[in-house]
Image (cartoon, rainbow, N blue to C red):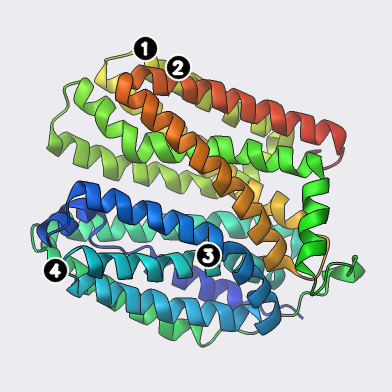
Amino acid sequence: MKPKRNVWLMYVIALLQGMVFYGPIATLYRQSAGVTIFEITIIESISLALCLLLELPWGIVADRIGYKKTMLFCCVLFFVSKIVFWKALGFEAFLVERIMLSIVISGLSGVDSSILYLSCDKDNTQRVFGIYNNLQTAGMLFASAIYSLVIKDNYRLAGFLTVFSYGIATIIAFWLVELKNNNNGKSREGAGNFFVLLKRILKYKYLILFLVGVALLNETHQTITVFLNQLQYVKCGLSDAAIGYIYIGVTLVGLLGIFSEKLTRKLGKMQFVSILYGSAVIACIILGVTVNAWLSVASIVILRISFSLFQPLQMELQNKQVVSQNRATELSINAVIINCVGIGTNLIYGKLAYVNIAFAMFTGALLCLAGFLLIYLWQTKCRGNLQS
């Protein structure tokens, strides 16, 4: 019998860990504590490199010690990292916090989705992933509203409230039930053998096409809606206050990911993917040619919706490709491939945006189109993956 209690506990943890009360002023928080913009970028670069280095070892460890223990350890370290962030002063303290966060991110990668996947009925996974993602977004929205209405310019109070929410999430993690991944009799060839798994995944070239296709949409969304959007808004003449309200609105539309499963059933997987990638391409093209504020905001919203609706589907598809009992290890390998693509796209977007932001937006359109073509090729060669 599946421990469905895990699903509800994971929902609550997602909501609480989404409550980062300093989210709207994360950069200003660090600057007020004596960290420069350049130092922030150095810390972020070190963090990403650590995530890539730790991703695969963590997957192996998670499959050996169990998903509950891994989840619990990461929640505890997540909580400690927020305490460090709350009290941090200067470059070294924030670097320590980010190193902790890198350990947590790489540890949770594949583990949270594995717990959800193994704790619910297989015909219900996409809906569960959609709710899980939306609760993280809901937590972020709640925290942003509290910051704007109550906390305002009290940065340290924002840090303290974040510590409080993560502390509760850690306590809840103790009630999770450990899971065993039996995979319904599927191949156990890769069990306990990371190199066999890695070799098999790298030889499965069509799965790599799928992962690269996923990465191109994910990273285009991440770069444009988190970083380049602000440059676009300034180009359109929007004020800082307006940008703040837009941030909340764009985050809010991310909740539409809850409809991913229903739309997939109604449209069929491949047609649904076509619409999402096509919408992203159009949004990027509009961003490249317009200086109109309304069109820019609408395009960012479309890009956000496309990503939010695609996330539950791609999480389900990734889990369905797992063929061994080492689910976390396989998903970690997938994450490394996706993140490696992200490093390349970030460099491309950053360089082009430095020259002209329109070049970066047009490149986003090209990369989203390329991502769709890769997924189309994957489903053509591996029929049944995206059939209705």
Asked if the residue under mark 1 is in contact with the one under mark 2, i.e. CB atoms within 8 Å, the reply is yes
Label 1 secondary element: helix
**CA distance separating discs 4 and 2:** 40 Å
Which residue is pictured at 66% across the width and 53% down the height? 334
Q: Which of marks 4 and 1 is nearer the N terminus?
A: 4
Circle 3 sits on which residue? 106
Asked if the residue under mark 3 is in contact with the one under mark 4, i.e. CB atoms within 8 Å, the reply is no
Left or right: 100 with respect to 315?
A: left
The spot of residue 43 in percent (x, y) is: 32, 56
The disc labelled 3 sits on which kind of residue?
A: Ser
Q: Can residue 307 be seen in this view?
A: no
Left or right: 48 with respect to 273?
A: left
Circle 1 sits on which residue? 289
Q: Badge 3 local density, few (<14 within 10 Å), some, or many (20+)?
A: many
**CA distance separating discs 2 and 3:** 34 Å
**CA distance separating discs 4 and 1:** 41 Å
**CA distance separating discs 3 and 1:** 38 Å
Q: Badge 1 local density, few (<14 within 10 Å), some, or many (20+)?
A: few
